[in-house]
Image (spheres, helix red, strand yellow):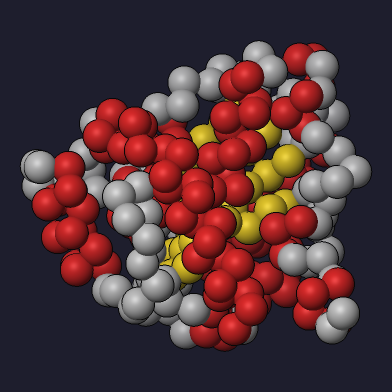
């Protein structure tokens, strides 16, 4: 077996040793930092989790700057003796240089409790996977147009009802995202490829978190 198959993938760091979704309620404290204050933040808040247990913040920051913020928030929570058990960082590749994306992964590597959730080119890759599998490059404008056709109304990042349009297709999206990730990882490091997404890992975590509420 080759080294690429035997070593842990980035999203697997710390996952086997600690299952925070099943932790006692008194210990359940999770932070999700998203780069935007609209699409991903509005979508994730629709999971309806207790905000005292799962805090979701849209930041207006991106890539490595967002990971730096996660580290600061982690350290501040430790000083306040109210640490987060897990921190998720949700960001898009967009047009940012690959250096920024690589730096984000480098910064997070020293913090097993910080889990990166990148998408390339953008979060909307996850939305379109609710309707069909695709593995050809798409820019954000084309993605938004295709999502609009699928949901039957114009898609905008500020739509507060996108979760309702997608919920019935959630299992399809999870299957398609796993397939895309596996295919990308076989070819290269998947967060560098368009399309790619790790949003399904966060969604799986939130669903498990809710089931154990």
- Can you name the residue that lies furthest to the front here? 1
Q: Quadrant of residue 144?
A: bottom left
- The image shows residue 30 at horizontal and vertical percentages of 67, 33
- Please name the residue shown 34% across and 78% down the image: 137
Q: Quadrant of the N terminus?
A: bottom right
- Please name the residue shown 49% across and 56% down the image: 177
Can residue 32 be seen here? Answer: no
- The image shows residue 213 at horizontal and vertical percentages of 66, 14
- Can you name the residue that lies furthest to the right here? 17
Classify 29 as above or below 129: above
The one nearer the camera, 188 or 58, is: 188
Apparent side of residue 198 relative to residue 19 in the rendered image (left or right)? left
- Can you name the residue that lies furthest to the left here? 153
Apparent side of residue 94 relative to residue 50 in the rendered image (left or right)? left
- Please name the residue shown 17% across and 48% down the image: 150
Apparent side of residue 101 relative to residue 122 in the rendered image (left or right)? right
- The image shows residue 136 at horizontal and vertical percentages of 35, 77
Classify 102 as above or below 64: below
Apparent side of residue 15 relative to residue 128 in the rendered image (left or right)? right
The one nearer the camera, 162 or 178, is: 178
The one nearer the camera, 142 or 5, is: 5
Can residue 18 be seen here? Answer: yes
- The image shows residue 17 at horizontal and vertical percentages of 90, 43
């Amino acid at each position: 077996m080759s080294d690429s198959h035997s070593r842990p993938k980035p999203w697997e760091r710390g996952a086997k040793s600690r299952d925070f979704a099943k932790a006692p309620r008194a210990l359940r404290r999770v932070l999700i930092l998203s780069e935007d204050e609209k699409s991903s933040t509005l979508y994730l808040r629709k999971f309806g989790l207790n905000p005292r247990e799962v805090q979701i913040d849209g930041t207006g920051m991106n890539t490595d700057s967002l990971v730096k913020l996660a580290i600061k928030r982690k350290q501040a929570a430790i000083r306040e003796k109210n640490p987060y058990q897990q921190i998720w960082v949700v960001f898009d590749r967009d047009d940012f240089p690959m250096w920024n994306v690589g730096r984000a992964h480098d910064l997070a590597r020293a913090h097993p409790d910080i889990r990166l959730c990148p998408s390339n080119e953008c979060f909307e890759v996850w939305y379109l996977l609710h309707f069909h599998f695709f593995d050809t490059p798409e820019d954000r404008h084309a993605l938004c147009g295709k999502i609009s056709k699928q949901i039957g109304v114009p898609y905008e990042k500020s739509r507060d009802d996108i979760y309702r349009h997608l919920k019935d297709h959630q299992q399809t999206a999870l299957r398609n995202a796993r397939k895309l990730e596996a295919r990308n990882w076989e070819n290269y490091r998947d967060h560098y490829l368009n399309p790619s997404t790790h949003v399904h890992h966060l969604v799986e975590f939130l669903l498990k978190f809710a089931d154990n509420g």
